[in-house]
């Protein structure tokens, strides 16, 4: 890698950058999801109070982040009404009779003086003459004042949001806890209060998907790179097949290891700062089961991605490639309604079929992803791991001939 920078960029840096970019995207999406679903009225009120009492822009303009007293309205010259750079001026046709109380309320906490005059100008001027309403900004300080005014508009919107959240919380208190009792589950499922677990599922699934993508694409990227440069066959002949494939595995582990080292701290920090204490306590209490769940998710998604990647090897057989690429995905999605239907059936046969679907790779992918919410048994997760790994090994052994043909094409 050090001798060939282009090889480092193609096989390491670009995939890592893309993977970390995807982590940032999914963390941003999950943060928005968590704020939307887990934010309470008290959280919004605390945020509003903090924004009003502590403003970095006020710290920059006045040397203190605390709000200013109500502004003084000046209608003429005077010792206390001298023009200052951060004052606001309002130009009107009749300054003596103009009611500026609305603007005083608007700028309360952010402006010291408001000048009402017929023909004057400060760095932030509001022109109301002849029925117009124009804000004229003449300096960076005035632009910062206008930004403070705009933040007050956002604060007013959040006040309405706080009242709406309080009304929703009152309704939720009247409803109480909503539990779904399904015969096919070992304990009831709580509909409310599982937002943190949903965020956990989304993040783990995204992290596993990106890791598997880096792992599976590592081999193909190396082969494509050396093939395009006409060095694949001489390289394999010179170093031997065993050493060549060992190098492929090293590249894969290097890509995956660097990605996990770079992404795991951000993901852990996200959970500490974003999810509620209830979810953190759940992770601590069920750390062993969650570890089994992560392995089950990785093995299940690995079987799905490996099945799809084999379609690239069989590109000369269109129908076979189509089956390998799309049928597994259709199985994963199509089994979901059947699985949930069987969950609510009382018969022993329905329960047995449901357990079988959960244990099988591809068929049980979605239930395995939702295992923390559905409270699936660790034994069932372990069976899914065994069957998924068996499917991966079977696919690798059965498609060795196709992989050799793919090398010949390269």
Image (cartoon, rainbow, N blue to C red):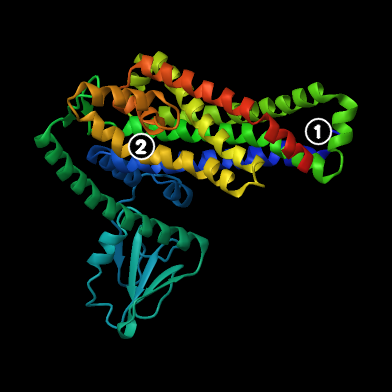
| Residue at (75, 22) in percent of width and height | 246
Q: Which residue corresponds to mark 1?
A: 1
Q: Which residue corresponds to mark 2?
A: 335
Marked residue nearer the N-terminal end (1 or 2):
1
Instruction: Tell me the CA gap for discs 1 and 2.
Output: 45 Å
| Residue at (27, 81) in percent of width and height | 94
Q: Quadrant of the N terminus?
A: top right
Give 279 or 243, whichever is nearer the viewer: 243
Q: Give the label, 1 or 2, closer to the camera.
A: 2
Under circle 2, the secondary element is helix
Under circle 1, the secondary element is loop
Tell me where residue 292 sits by quadrant. top left
| Residue at (41, 37) in percent of width and height | 332
Residue 344 visible somewhere in the drawing: yes
From the top left corner, tell me how far across and down residue 156 is, in percent.
27, 54
Is 327 above or below relative to 259? below
Please say if the residues under marks 1 and 2 sit with CB atoms less than 8 Å apart: no
Relative placement, left or right, of 54 versus 245 is left
Q: Residue furthest bottom?
A: 130
From the top left corner, tell me how far across and down residue 90 is, in percent.
34, 73
Relative placement, left or right, of 139 versus 202 is right
Tell me where residue 383 sits by quadrant. top left
- Mark 1 surroundings within 10 Å by alpha-carbon count, few (fewer than 14), some (14 through 19), many (20 or more): few
| Residue at (25, 31) in percent of width and height | 342
Tell me where residue 195 sits by quadrant. top left
From the top left corner, tell me how far across and down residue 192 is, in percent.
22, 33
Give 199 or 135, whichever is nearer the viewer: 199
Q: Quadrant of the C terminus?
A: top right
Residue 6 visible somewhere in the drawing: no
Give 291 or 367, whichever is nearer the viewer: 367
Relative placement, left or right, of 158 versus 120 is left
């Amino acid at each position: 890698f050090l001798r060939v920078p282009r090889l480092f960029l193609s096989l390491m840096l670009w995939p890592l950058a893309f993977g970390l970019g995807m982590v940032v995207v999914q963390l941003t999406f999950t943060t928005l999801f968590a704020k939307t679903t887990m934010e309470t009225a008290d959280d919004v009120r605390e945020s509003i109070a903090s924004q009003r009492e502590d403003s970095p822009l006020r710290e920059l303009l006045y040397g203190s982040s605390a709000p200013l007293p109500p502004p003084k309205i000046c209608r003429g010259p005077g010792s206390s009404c001298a023009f200052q750079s951060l004052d606001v001026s309002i130009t009107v046709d009749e300054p003596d009779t103009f009611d500026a109380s609305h603007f005083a309320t608007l700028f309360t906490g952010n402006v010291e003086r408001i000048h009402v005059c017929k023909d004057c100008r400060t760095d932030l001027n509001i022109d109301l003459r002849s029925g117009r309403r124009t804000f004229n900004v003449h300096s960076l300080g005035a632009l910062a004042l206008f930004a403070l005014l705009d933040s007050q508009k956002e604060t007013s919107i959040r006040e309405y949001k706080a009242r709406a959240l309080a009304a929703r919380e009152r309704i939720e208190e009247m409803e109480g806890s909503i539990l779904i009792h399904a015969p096919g589950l070992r304990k009831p499922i709580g509909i409310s209060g599982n937002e943190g677990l949903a965020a956990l599922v989304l993040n783990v699934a995204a992290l596993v998907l990106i890791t598997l993508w880096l792992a599976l694409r590592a081999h193909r990227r190396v082969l494509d790179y050396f093939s395009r440069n006409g060095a694949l066959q001489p390289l394999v002949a010179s170093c031997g097949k065993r050493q060549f494939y060992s190098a492929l595995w090293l590249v894969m582990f290097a890509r995956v290891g660097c990605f996990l080292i770079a992404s795991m701290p951000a993901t852990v920090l996200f959970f500490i700062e974003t999810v509620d204490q209830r979810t953190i306590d759940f992770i601590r209490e069920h750390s062993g089961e969650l570890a089994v769940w992560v392995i089950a998710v990785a093995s299940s998604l690995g079987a799905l991605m490996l099945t799809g990647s084999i379609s690239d090897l069989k590109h000369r057989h269109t129908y076979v490639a189509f089956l390998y690429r799309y049928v597994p995905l259709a199985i994963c999605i199509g089994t979901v309604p059947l699985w949930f239907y069987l969950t609510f059936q009382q018969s022993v046969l329905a329960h047995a079929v449901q357990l079988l679907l959960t244990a099988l790779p591809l068929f049980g992918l979605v239930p395995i992803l939702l295992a923390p919410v559905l409270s699936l048994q660790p034994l069932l997760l372990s069976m899914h791991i065994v069957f998924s790994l068996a499917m991966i090994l079977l696919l690798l052994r059965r498609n060795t001939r196709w992989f050799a043909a793919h090398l010949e094409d390269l």
